[in-house]
Image (cartoon, rainbow, N blue to C red):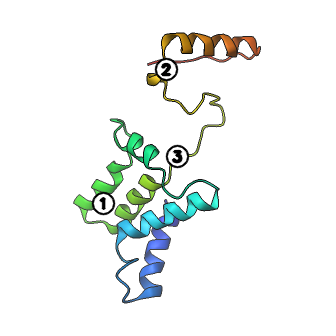
Amino acid sequence: MNKVKRTYTRARGILGNSNILQNPYIAGGIAGAVKNLIYGHPALNIRSIQHRITLPNAKNPLIPLLLGYFLKNKPLQAIGAFLIVDPPAPNDLDDMPNEDIDDMSDEEIKALSEEIEEEGKEKKICIH
């Protein structure tokens, strides 16, 4: 997040009168898209963005964006835009497929748990 803040403040100074990168939403979005391209992901993954912004939890990327808007804090708005575009890093301990557990049927969950047990690893599946 500090990188986004530094990028935003540097862009303001480097480009001076350019209004494009002075907009915190565009600066954060471009920074997130560039990071995705560097790591070999698509620049914008609309499905991932839609899924993450509709989750009612503390990890929702709209929270810093709206906080920045209401507090009139442009670096926080840029960070919020960055978090919306850039998906969170995958958890290395999580071997679950990219499917959402809510979309899986009971049979698929049972087959997945049996498959994990067959591998001989001690893993627990927590279903909320």
Residue at left offset 36%, top offset 66%: 25
Tag in front: 3 or 2: 2
Residue at the far bottom: name it: 17
Task: Please give the label number shown on residue 68.
Answer: 1
Residue 2 appears in the figure = no
Task: Please give the label number shown on residue 88.
Answer: 3
CA gap, disc 3 to disc 2? 22 Å
Measured as percent of width and height from the top left, residue 98 is found at 56, 33
Residue bearing the label numbered 2: 104
Q: Which secondary structure, mark 2? A: loop
Image quadrant where one finds the C terminus: top left
Which is nearer the eye, 38 or 44? 44
Tag in front: 3 or 1: 3
Would you call the spot at circle 3 few (<14 residues within 10 Å), some (14-19), or many (20 or more)?
few
What kind of residue is marked 3?
Pro
Q: Which secondary structure, mark 1? A: helix
